[in-house]
Amino acid sequence: MGELEDAVMTRVWKWNRPVTVREVLEDLQQERSIAYTTVMTVLDNLHQKGWVRREAEGRAYRYEAVSTRAAYAAALMNDAWSQSDNPAAALVAFFGMMSDEQRRALRDAVRIVQGPETPEPAEPPDTRRVTSTDTSSADTGTDTPTDTDRQNPGSAREPGGR
């Protein structure tokens, strides 16, 4: 997005409502000399690029942003990152440029994306593999002791597979 397109989109995003060329023109004219047809062309270009949608109102259009400024910034970051031949190094360099405030915002964003922390299970489930010599009752439906049970008599199961 060019500098003038950004200046126009900044207003569209800030006002967060459908706007006319005249409204954008009058606001832009407070900081620069610009023609109505220039603003009209910029908004038409933004429409063609998919950044704004427009709806006819009489002989003019009202323009409204298709997405947020945050989504635009994310798309720029994603595009720049995907063009890197070393994405990890690009991220490290990017993080190195961040202010403390930006790092805090990044940590907050990661927490939001990851969701609430889930506690780890206290003990992993029994993941013994069944082999041709291991015929535990849990796998065969019988009360035949396993090789492990024979080696450790204190760990033998009660009859009935309990």
Image (cartoon, rainbow, N blue to C red):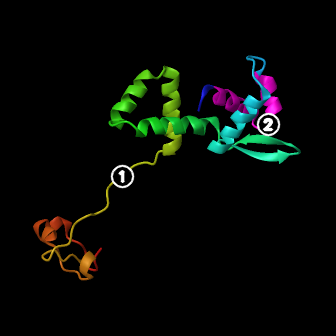
Q: Please tell me whether mark 1 sits on a helix, a strand or a loop.
A: loop
Please indicate whether residue 85 sits to the left or right of residue 107 in the image: left
Dominant secondary structure of the residues highlighted in magenta in the image: helix
Q: How crowded is mark 2: few (under 14 residues within 10 Å), some or many (20 or more)?
A: some
Compared with 90, 64 (above or below) is: below
* Residue pointed to by mark 1: 122
Of tags 1 and 2, the one toward the viewer is: 2
Depth order, front residue of 57/137: 57
Query: For residue 157, what is the image quadrant?
Result: bottom left
> For residue 54, which quarter of the picture?
top right
- Residue under pointer 2: 19
On screen, residue 6 above or below 162: above
Residue at 37% x, 29% y: name it: 92
Left or right, residue 123 beside residue 77: left
Q: Magenta stretch: give its range.
A: 4-28
Q: Which amino acid does the dot numbered 2 rest on?
A: Val
Residue positioned 53% across, 39% down in the render:
75
Where is residue 28 drawn, in percent x and y? 75, 23
Q: CA gap, disc 1 to disc 2? A: 57 Å
